Image (cartoon, helix red, strand yellow):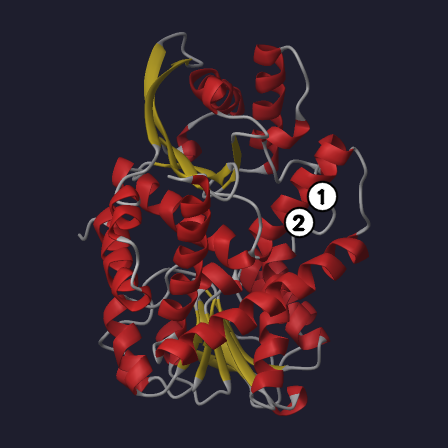
Amino acid sequence: MSDPYQNAMKQIDKIAKIINLDPDIKERLSEPDRVLTVAIPVKMDNGKIKVFTGFRSQYNNARGPYKGGIRYHQNVSLSEVKALSAWMTWKCSVAGIPYGGGKGGIIVNPKELSIGELERLSRGYIRAIWQFIGSDVDVPAPDVNTTSQIMAWMVDEYAKLTGKLDLAVITAKPLEIGGSQGRTEATGQGGVYVLEALAKEFKLKPSATKIAVQGFGNVGYYFALLAQKAGFKIVALSDSRGGIYSEKGFDVETVKKYKKETGKIQDFKGAKNITNDELLELPVTILVPAALESVITKDNAPKIKTKLIIEMANGPITPEADVILHDKKVLFVPDVLSNSGGVTVSYFEWVQNRMGYYWTKEEVFNKLKPIMVNAFKEGLTAARKYNIDMRMGVYSLAVQKVADAMKLKGI
């Protein structure tokens, strides 16, 4: 198994050569600003104390407070959290929002905890890190296996510890306590704004643009639904159990209803059943991996028939596959850009909390669209300027912005 943080550092090595990065800046970016490892004692329902290990990595704050989610998973590691904090730095930089990057995690399988144990664990995590977070310092959010309810407990615990209610300390909260309109579908909506910009760039007519979406969770569902509403043709969909294909295209709401009733999307009336692997190799205009990481590898990359890919999952294409796809002249819009709608709307939530003034969903999306479109244009321009794939183009742009901020501050 490769080391996530070493992978993140290899990317910086590659980018440093492309943009001729100042060696002192590169050296400073070789380690996070701060990494916390904390012990979280939790009184379990059986009355015994169990100690969980938690982490918070604060990678870089040259452009603003650290920003990044907290994940609850049995495989959380220090290396993973450090790598994710670096990638969050680039994601915020690409979107042009005034944040640095951070990430947190607890080694736990939350499915094994009762609601009470989960609440005590979440509050315990904040007690362990509260002196190192804050709306001007580090702003956590949900990630894998964490929810808006968990964020609500954390905000409440932070208020108890500090003696004041600071809603902007954590984002993706429930609407009732300072959450933002549109946060649920923000990642999918941001991806559709990228899709529209891509279609405009390559002069694609939406009704003639066939799209295959792998993944029917929150991101995949909203991407497919909103793309269809924008006039695009969704010809293939899949969930973890398999997929469906129809040349005519699908009504996404009807498929969602069918899945709710049957627990699957296969055997949908009038559609051909396909595997997840087959979906990736369909001759569509645009492929959208929106489920798992590393689904396009050196083994199946040569069989990919599309010329355009929008990454909505995190890391769906392996580095080896990147090279093969670039050689095949496949343009792929990287995850740090295409799925940054979520963190951008989290930024809007933070702004609204600080102003004490809240926007409608329409206002939120009107503000999101130009940010996503501008990030796409800048990323594509950088890729063409350096004659590299769009992932490296986007990363180059992001690292350069962070480096410029570090130089101006005299770091």
Mark 2: few/some/many CA within 10 Å (<14, 14-19, 20+) = many
Q: CA distance from mark 1 to mark 2?
A: 6 Å
Q: Quadrant of the C terminus?
A: top left
**What SS does tag 2 mark?**
loop
Observer-nearest of 294 and 250? 294
Relative height, residue 158 to residue 329 (above, below): above
**What SS does tag 1 mark?**
loop
Q: Residue at x 32, y 64 (%)?
A: 294
Observer-nearest of 24 and 97? 24
| Residue of label 2 | 183
| Residue of label 1 | 180
Residue 274 rendering spot, x and y as whole percentages: 43, 79
Q: Quadrant of residue 395?
A: bottom left
| Kind of residue at disc 2 | Arg
Mark 1: few/some/many CA within 10 Å (<14, 14-19, 20+) = many
Relative height, residue 7 to residue 28 (above, below): below
Residue 137 rendering spot, x and y as whole percentages: 52, 29
